[in-house]
Image: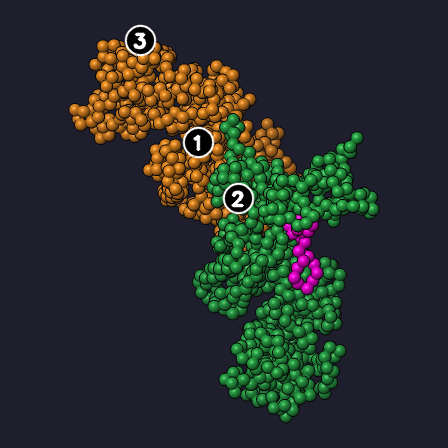
Chain colours: A orange, B green
Amino acid sequence: MPATDALVIFTPSGKRGRFAIGTPVLTAARQLGVDLDSVCGGRGICSKCQITPAYGDFPKHGITVADDALSEWNKVEARYDEKRGLKPGRRLGCQATVQGDVVIDVPPESQVHKQVVRKAAAARAITMDPATRLYLVEVAEPDMHDPSGDLERLRAALADQWDVTGITAPLSVLSQLQPALRKGKWQVTVAVHHDHTGAAPRLIDIWPGFYEDGLYGLAIDLGSTTIAAHLTDLVTGQVLESSGIMNPQIRFGEDLMSRVSYAMMNPGGDAEMTAAVRAALNDLTSALAETAGIDPRAIVEQVFVCNPVMHHLLLGIDPVELGQAPFALATSGSLSLAAADLGQTTLNANARAYILPCIAGHVGADAAAVALSEEPNKSDDLALIVDVGTNAEILLGDREKVLACSSPTGPAFEGAQISSGQRAAPGAIERVEIDPVTKEPRFRVIGCDLWSDDPGFATATAVTGVTGICGSGIIEAVAEMRMAGLVDPSGLIGSAAQTGTQRSEPEGRTHAYLIHDGSADGGPRITVTQGDIRAIQLAKSALYAGARLLMDVRGVDKVDRVVLAGAFGAHISPKHAMVLGMIPDVPLDKVISAGNAAGTGARIALCNRAARAEIEATVAQIHKIETAIEPKFQEHFVAANALPHATDPFPELAQVVTLPQVSFNTGGEDGGRRRRRRG
Amino acid sequence: MPATDALVIFTPSGKRGRFAIGTPVLTAARQLGVDLDSVCGGRGICSKCQITPAYGDFPKHGITVADDALSEWNKVEARYDEKRGLKPGRRLGCQATVQGDVVIDVPPESQVHKQVVRKAAAARAITMDPATRLYLVEVAEPDMHDPSGDLERLRAALADQWDVTGITAPLSVLSQLQPALRKGKWQVTVAVHHDHTGAAPRLIDIWPGFYEDGLYGLAIDLGSTTIAAHLTDLVTGQVLESSGIMNPQIRFGEDLMSRVSYAMMNPGGDAEMTAAVRAALNDLTSALAETAGIDPRAIVEQVFVCNPVMHHLLLGIDPVELGQAPFALATSGSLSLAAADLGQTTLNANARAYILPCIAGHVGADAAAVALSEEPNKSDDLALIVDVGTNAEILLGDREKVLACSSPTGPAFEGAQISSGQRAAPGAIERVEIDPVTKEPRFRVIGCDLWSDDPGFATATAVTGVTGICGSGIIEAVAEMRMAGLVDPSGLIGSAAQTGTQRSEPEGRTHAYLIHDGSADGGPRITVTQGDIRAIQLAKSALYAGARLLMDVRGVDKVDRVVLAGAFGAHISPKHAMVLGMIPDVPLDKVISAGNAAGTGARIALCNRAARAEIEATVAQIHKIETAIEPKFQEHFVAANALPHATDPFPELAQVVTLPQVSFNTGGEDGGRRRRRRG
């Protein structure tokens, strides 16, 4: 008597069960809860359910798989292979039926909840579970004897064929429903958005028959200066295109506070800024769709991360309350709304937008995204995460507790308010070294791999020139000046007589250090002035004081690791940051750059709806510290003003240089003041 | 020892309990679940919680109420009385406290779920339970030590003070939240919409402090010919203003099918009609608000009832599928959506719209509204409910089962396609009597109470003239002609020789009956032609056949009562309707006019959200019959063509006139045909 059923084992899940001979592999997978994709519901159209049967002996599973363990290659598979090509060994899970004991592998691309390895350093992967998915459904035709609406029959079909219940339909889809059903001969593909909020699933779009093109989403990091967007495939999780543009609000003010001021001083100023950023987002979306060669209608979701002021201006809320104590947010919770409500018109008309929650009035959805990406709340060791920008957002925590604050570092770290400062762009000095013996500098500029003392540097930089010094460059310059004994612990630049180099030039009542003189070729003289040192001291004190404040609250004197986040954080030299006292001392290999962690957080929230619920819960648990009202913040700020390290703290990584502890008192501006206070 | 608590009895509910001396009456009422209104939450602002204490002996309740059973009149009450006036004997429930045993009456206007007696004949009342309500809330101020959004604190306050949880806020309200909270010193009034669908409650609007003006809604009966709207107070249920305008879609086609044809023949024709009706609705709303002297922002809800074609055109859905079998609706379920999605801009920006469910492709939300108003599903006896218009919607049922169909009566009942027909307007003949002996007619016209043979009729109608005959007039004319022996059972008009009156005039190969000759004064000659009789016969046969079909399905030969609904139904003479055979015979006192039952249904759904759930459940239970595919409908239609009654079937109500059974065979058009068929 032939066997009436057979053992089916799926890998990599290891799920197994006995099924009647003739059962389609897809059916067996579904009954076992194996993660095998299908959009067409087993009709041999979508090819999402590809599987690879394995043959031979499997002692581990205790079975032997015969060559005829699956049914023969059928017409549907042959046609698909001819039209699109099936990889060798692959079968369509909906067509191949079980004929004997078999081991079946589900390749990653056939898993709904496939994992996408992130580009960032951390090895964590994103599990795909997007809010919007496609479903092919067969809808019953209308029956005059039992009249019902086309939408009601579509609802019944979705519930019956896909267990998707209670969908709502916007009018724009409802008006397309009848023609689509008739054109598709009662077979349609629908995009359904079902998020984590408990709201009823929404019909986003409808296509007659089987819709073959993909669905896409945008992960958007809306910064004060730049807007970065990642066009992401909602099935594979892959980023098709990334693009960044300047935030057009810059014309209303360079930093956050100047934009808040603009809104306060100009009636309707907030609406102007809202309109500007929304228009820029529309343009960015159009450009991304065009570059990637996709239909803008296929873009069905947006996820935004941004600081609180950008958050309010995106939403059309006057940010005035964020400019004054108690820094009240209009809303701190996450937002799930129609992209159209945000004036977004260059993507699917029913696209949805999700905005991560804000942590506090100064700690925005961008910090929440960093928390989602870096997961301090799941860390075994105590992590200090710093997102460096015009404001620094600081997170400190581990599994036990996470603390957050924001610190007003000002724009010095971004090269602004520095005498030779500029944005990070070709021609900007980004790396600096100063010989502790000769006091001679060498440097590198963005766009060129050579050092300034390498042969060919002048030729290689002929086009860009050496135009100024960017944020990471000024940090290295100041740290190197301190290590070379050009600057004393109070931050004072010594005179040529004191430092032994003519590069120490008088500048008013203080001194400046000449890094590069391009004046012979009509270029700039690039110096680090006493004012630049003061600006960096203020910025680094603010950053350090914020971190120290959180450490106080946590009751610790040191942290186990430091994560530098943000595009700028990616370029800071950890060694120099510690020389400056920007961040608390930790072993150098415990300082990690997380790259654009906020953007990564946005991508995670775009690809995985459970991550949205997760970050909402995490943010609710984060303990917020308002630096503006903590007296200890001021204490730490003042105490952190000095430049403590006379030596390179990591001699094993660099030439060991021991310098005398220098301290200048030249009667210059600051020294004079100090004297007067003493007098 | 003085008593520490006291017995409090509320009337009319009879709820009672003991409360500590000093308990405010409002608190006692809330704890007992007594239906006592309050918008301000007991702050002595809103005056919604007015109560009337009763003093003296109450043997029924076994207590005596002393004069000092409540606390003395306090400052808040005195101020309120001075500013607004309190009725004698009234107290504010939130101010008066219990001092001894007391009986407290809650007057109807202080009940949240107050009942409003409908104007319509039926005595049923509407229980107020609107979806949108006002709440005064006190919101916690922001705290830098525990930062949270203003919306999140408003949410907490609503949950804490009003048990309203999980509200969502549209961006337009969110952008008003911060200024309103600060202007109102952390006290705001919010309008919250919480319907029956299970959706989260929505914030509709916000006002600083206590908002004193009311909330209003519109109950809209969107007909093919006219649009009627009732501006309704959502607290009292009273209709402030009603207004009707012509449906501007008339220029695209008089009846439903011609509008469907217009959409089929003209690309974008459906969008044109959608735009026209939406603009008209906006104008109607503005006009109503202006007449009533209210702020359009206070109009927060709309409820629509309409036939399926109007339904689709309102929603922006091409109605083409409704013009051909199987008459599939795009959606048959109820719709709960933003009024803005329907292009409604002249009311609150966040106003909600509710559209009742459709019963079938030919039986719309208007028929559902009739079912809600007339409740056949709760009837002990078997009711036939007919909504007479261009299409007649017919409901037959009782507690056991309700059947529904639609019957294509055509426009004859509305005076269209009648030789002297016109819409019901001043100057139109609406009542007709014909003396069975002299065969002389007399009539009344709309806008004048005199009969045409009364002295002064000519003077009274000098302005309007006698311009034509409207729907109810033609029905009476044909029925009276039959009773006067001017028409035989087949519907043929006799010649002057046969009828004995010169008013029977030759008209082509048939005859016509002259009702009024205004030609001497330059007015029209108003006659009932053979064609008119045929049009009425077709219309009444369709109506009767629909009713009979439902009776067949139900397995009955007679019904217990007939309800005539619709504005036109309100003017039909039941006697003449039965003479014509429009409706099955029932005792005359069992024919009731329900007035504009569809409009009443809309008002009920506007004032009571539970009624929405109720009608949705009822519609799901209604058994739909499609007349177009029922062979028996054709049979009934043909069989119902005759005019059976030779005599007034209700002689006790009119002069008894017995006439010979006349039957003409004049060789005219129809008679000739009949002969040819015989030959």
Residue A187 shows in the view: no
Q: Residue at x 44, y 43 (%)?
A: A342
Name the subunit of mark 1. Answer: A
The magenta region covers B106-129
The image quadrant of residue B530 is bottom right
Residue A638: x, y in percent? Answer: 40, 17
Foreground residue, A292 or A575? A575
Residue, disc 2: B206
Dot 3 falls on which chain?
A
Residue A493 coordinates in the image, percent (x, y): 28, 15
SS class of the residue under badge 2?
strand
Q: Residues within 10 Å of mark 3 (few under 14, many from 20)?
A: some
Of the two numbered discs 3 and 1 in the rendering, the one whose residue sits closer to the viewer: 1
Whichever of callouts 3 and 1 sits on the residue coming sooner in the sequence is 1
Count of numbered badges drawn on the protein: 3
Location of mark 1 (residue):
A324
* Residue B42 drawn at (x, y percent): 63, 40
* Residue at the farthest top position: A660
Left or right, A393 with respect to A425, comes to right
**Residue type at the position of mark 2:** Ile
Q: Are marks 2 and 1 in contact (CB under 8 Å)?
A: no
Same chain letter for marks 2 and 1? no
Q: Is residue B43 left or right of residue A655?
A: right
> At 50% from the left edge and 52% from the top edge, which residue is drawn?
B340
**Which residue in the structure is indicated by mark 3?**
A662
